[in-house]
Image: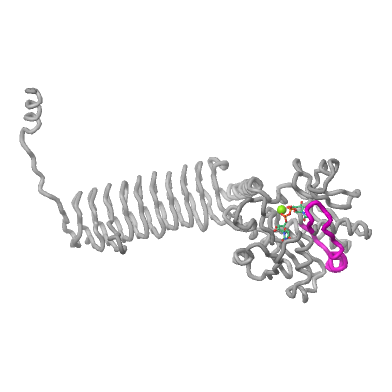
Amino acid sequence: MKISGVILAAGKGTRMKSSLPKVLQPVLGKAMISYAQSAIKNLDNKYVILGYESETVSDHIFEGYKIVEQKEQLGTGHAVVTLLDSDEFKSDNCDYLIVTPGDVPLIDKSEIDKLIGAVTKNNSALGLITAEVQNPSGYGRIVRNKEYAKKIVEEADASEKEKSINEINSGIYCVSKDFLISNINTIKSDNAQNEFYLTDLIEIAFQNKQDAVIVQVIEDTIKGVNSMSQLNDVEDTLKEKLITSHMENGVYFQDPSTTYIDETVKIHSGTKIFANCHLTGNTEIQENCEIGPNSLINDSKIGEGSKVLYSVVDGSEIESNGKIGPYAHLRTGSSLGDNVKVGAFAETKNSKISKDSKVPHLAYVGDAELEEGVNFSAGAITVNYDGKEKHKTEIKKGAFVGSDAMLVAPVTIGEGAMVGAGSVITKDVPAKSLGIERNQQKNIDGYMDRKKSSKDKK
Ligand code: UD1
Ligand code: MG
């Protein structure tokens, strides 16, 4: 049995009131359309119908999916006609076609397999996935004839009685290719929206005495996204599932309701995620870390046993036992070795900070390389930018940079050297030397007493 699949994704998504094509709206960090693609990835031939901003959307289409353009979006029925008429589909000798919308991201392969099983068991002409829901508004309602579907009525066309039906259409169908080819052109657009509704196929089947098989699933799996509030609802449902699966793998969450995690994030067992954390992009958090409360980690790798407290880590890598924060900002290209501390109000960028080094407070380390065991004290900064170009600072093994020092790059602080507090360093400091740049301190004897007595006289 050969089964092909098509994703309908040509619409703009007008009800989203967003200029971004609906199927590109991110759902836990991934474009909405990627979920439908994953759900049908095992089918024989796969197609995607694109229309609105097809060029932008096509960048998100996986390899192995053929794109068919629907120039005018005249309805879901018309989208399928466009597929059947396309050169791409001409040589397809499938027995059945799975049709799924691009805006139902929670569906997964197992439900589609159930549908295929139910339809192919008795060589039925078609079948569809439905669910009983609390609030059916906006969805097509299933009018039943005992166990089979008789027709689907869209909200806009439904009578009050039909609106009270709470079994809804998922928009996911399995249809025999022969049935489709013989009947798709009989679909008309004489309805409230003047569109060619794919849902009309059910009534056509019923009139031809063909059974439209129903596979009922739970509401969560077929939630559709037509508005921003439905997008939020779908994301919440998916997030809950995702956090549960992380918990099953031994990750602790203090407050899942305030935690946001992208699908793409990996978290290893023994790690604790405290309240108000955002973990996004290509992030990996290794074993036994403590993240948060209140931290944002994006596209970063956090090594085993690290702690990140009230901090932002973006595009960076931390090896084991890092101590970050509170209130640290690791910007793109920060690479920290084992046991490195970047503490309160410190910022790093495009810098390598090696094993056992410390940037404990109020510092800026940019375009720098700190070797092992460096101490970069409070208020010290690398002056990496001359207004035109960025320059590099090198600080060799075991060097000590005193508080409030300005290291004007390019500059090198030698191994074991010390930079005196408050110095503006413009020349290299040799190994084991003290680099100091300050005026001599003057102490004025008896000054405070004299000041007091002159006040008293007034
Ligand atoms: C559709 C169903 C409805 C079902 C709901 C499930 C119809 C007529 N209605 O309604 O019964 O309950 O999905 O979520 O099918 N598209 C195209 N070309 C077009 C029109 C739409 O590719 O010409 C695509 C859209 O981009 C979208 C999908 O088809 O991904 C569904 O279209 P949408 O407008 O969201 O239909 P609903 O009103 O949600
Ligand atoms: Mg929809």
Q: Quadrant of ligand 1?
A: bottom right
Closest to the observer, 422 or 12: 12
User: Which residue is located at x 66 percent, y 47 percent?
Assistant: 230
Indicate how the structure is coloured in the image. Answer: one colour
User: Which residue is located at x 76 percent, y 68 percent?
Assistant: 83
Closest to the observer, 126 or 317: 126
Q: Is residue 310 above or below residue 315?
A: above
Closest to the observer, 246 or 231: 231
Give percent across and percent down for residue 379.
27, 48
Q: Is residue 282 magenta?
A: no
Give percent across and percent down for residue 254.
53, 41
**How many badges with numbers are in the image?**
0
Q: Quadrant of the N terminus?
A: bottom right
The answer to whether residue 196 is left or right of residue 294 is right
Give percent across and percent down for residue 44.
74, 70
The answer to whether residue 373 is left or right of residue 328 is left
User: Which residue is located at x 22 percent, y 50 percent?
Assistant: 402
Q: Quadrant of the C terminus?
A: top left
| Residue 160 visible from this viewpoint | yes
Q: What span is colored magenta in the figure?
A: 172-195
Residue 111, by quadrant, is: bottom right
The answer to whether residue 291 is left or right of residue 447 is right
| Residue 396 visible from this viewpoint | no
The answer to whether residue 297 is left or right of residue 397 is right
Give percent across and percent down for residue 360.
32, 47
Q: Is residue 175 magenta?
A: yes
